[in-house]
Amino acid sequence: MKSLNLLSLIDAKKDLSIEVLSNYLDNYSVKISDNELDDLYSLVENIQRCHNDLEIFENFFVGYSIPQISREFDLLRIGNNNVINIELKKIYTGKERIEKQLKRNKYYLSFLDKETFNYTYVDESNKLYSLNEAENLIEQNINELIDKLIQQEVPKIKNIDNLFDPSNYLVSPFNSTDVFVEGKYFLTNHQETIRKSILEDNPTTQPCYISIYGAAGTGKTLLTYDIAKYYINESKEVIIFHCGNLNEGHDRLNSNYSWPIVPIKEVDRHELTTYNLIVIDEIQRIRKNQLNRILESLKDTNVKCIFSYDPKQCLHRNEIFNNIPEYIEDKVPVQKHELTEKIRTNNEIASFIKNLFDLSKINPTQKYSNIEISYFSDYSDAKKYLDILNRRDWKVINYTPSRDSYPYRRYNICGEDSAHGVIGQEFDKVVAVIDEYFHYNKEGKLATEYRGYYHVTKMLFQILTRTRKKLNIIIINNEVLLEKCLKILNRKK
């Protein structure tokens, strides 16, 4: 997207044919409706009555959306030291709605680390609004905006997308616990829609079963725990069962904020009929006998029960075979809500992981600047290097130990989390190991020769998808995998 001059945009709207205007807007990647153009014309006209310097209309991004999260700004002007955002409205939509939008915009723009000035202009009344220091909506004089525009030093921005990191906007209840509990985050429009639907569905005579599912990075855990937080804040009876061992984030929520999170193995200790909301997180890992007891206990109640899961995050062969999500649908009616928009995993990381597991998924246009690859022929040298990365604040994630004589014990780092231990968590920089047992089958899919208690390729997928920004691949004694990884980075078949 390119910035443009607002007055130029207005003149184009007035003078150009529909076809030429469309081409003009495409040149700047601008998407703006006729109504919004009318609102913009009203704003520009009001500014010109007070100040007619063409320069203050320069370098605006019109209708810019942050990649992957669809947060759109009507007018955005990014200066060296501050940011000006103006939202356009035909009519006054109410104090609460305008206030909420301006607060959201302030939050999303705060990651630019610049002072932000957020305004809403209402065409019908020719009035300008902003937030005061207490974040309450106030009417603002147009001259205040003009002064900010005059004083702003605006550089030419070649690629505005480079200023925004989508991963900043997905808060993890486990890795950013305090921020989550204090509500210092916003859901995407898609998450908000699902949340509203779930909260409005109040069962009366029978249990209500709801599933929230999605791939890694879609915000499934945040949405699930946000709904649980709403019920907790409303003093409702809530319990969250986690299908696995609790992580440090679970422990912080339990100990610091008195959340009711327990491992699924303790389900028989609780009288399920006493709760308003039951959440079962990572349901794909539950045992069938545990699930059957839960469904049997709830059949004559009006309890709301949420199943949260990622169908791809199965780490044991039995979990794959059981196909719990499908099993649930055969047992009880389920309202399904799928999250499809990836937020946490940036496009680069997601593209690499997809291509690594399937060689046919090459992305010839993707550039890889945040993927590092190192090769070692000796396990002990690889482990020493892992220790070095660990000290450099890289998150080293071990393959989960099992009872059999698994080969990856040779490079597991003592004291670090396993693939099972990081379920639902996220880290800026992640290290993963690919050893000599990995190979590609005839279909070009990543596989492994080792048949252990846990599914090794599934564990590798779990490890890789925990990263938000940077990925470091350590390859041990496997020239073929090294060659394939290098081809992915160089975008070669």
Image (tube, helix red, strand yellow):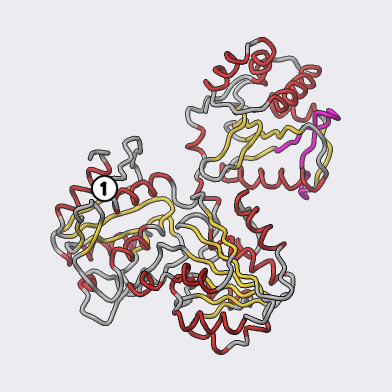
Q: Residue at x 34, y 53 (%)?
A: 471
Outermost bottom residue: 269
Q: Residue at x 34, y 62 (%)?
A: 391
- Quadrant of the frame with the C terminus: top left
Say above or below: 218 vs 348. below
Is residue 126 on the magenta stretch? yes
Say above or below: 109 vs 251. above
**Left or right of 137 in this view: 172:** left
Outermost top residue: 15
Is residue 47 on the magenta stretch? no
Residue position marked by numbered label 1 in the rendering = 359
Outermost front residue: 330
Picture coordinates of residue 89 (x, y %)? 76, 33
Q: Amino acid at mark 1?
A: Leu
Of residue 149 and residue 282, the one placed in the foreground of this image is 282
Asked which quadrant contains residue 271, the reply is bottom right
Asked which quadrant contains residue 180, the reply is bottom right
Picture coordinates of residue 183 (x, y %)? 66, 60
How many marks do you count on the picture?
A: 1
Say above or below: 295 vs 187. below
Neighbours of disc 1 within 10 Å: few (<14), some (14-19), many (20+) = some
Of residue 339 and residue 327, the one placed in the foreground of this image is 327
**Left or right of 255 in this view: 117:** right
Picture coordinates of residue 305 (x, y %)? 61, 72
Say above or below: 23 vs 33. above
**Left or right of 237 in this view: 324:** left
- Range covered by the magenta-colored residues: 118-135
Q: Residue at x 45, y 79 (%)?
A: 288
Q: Secondary structure at mark 1?
A: loop
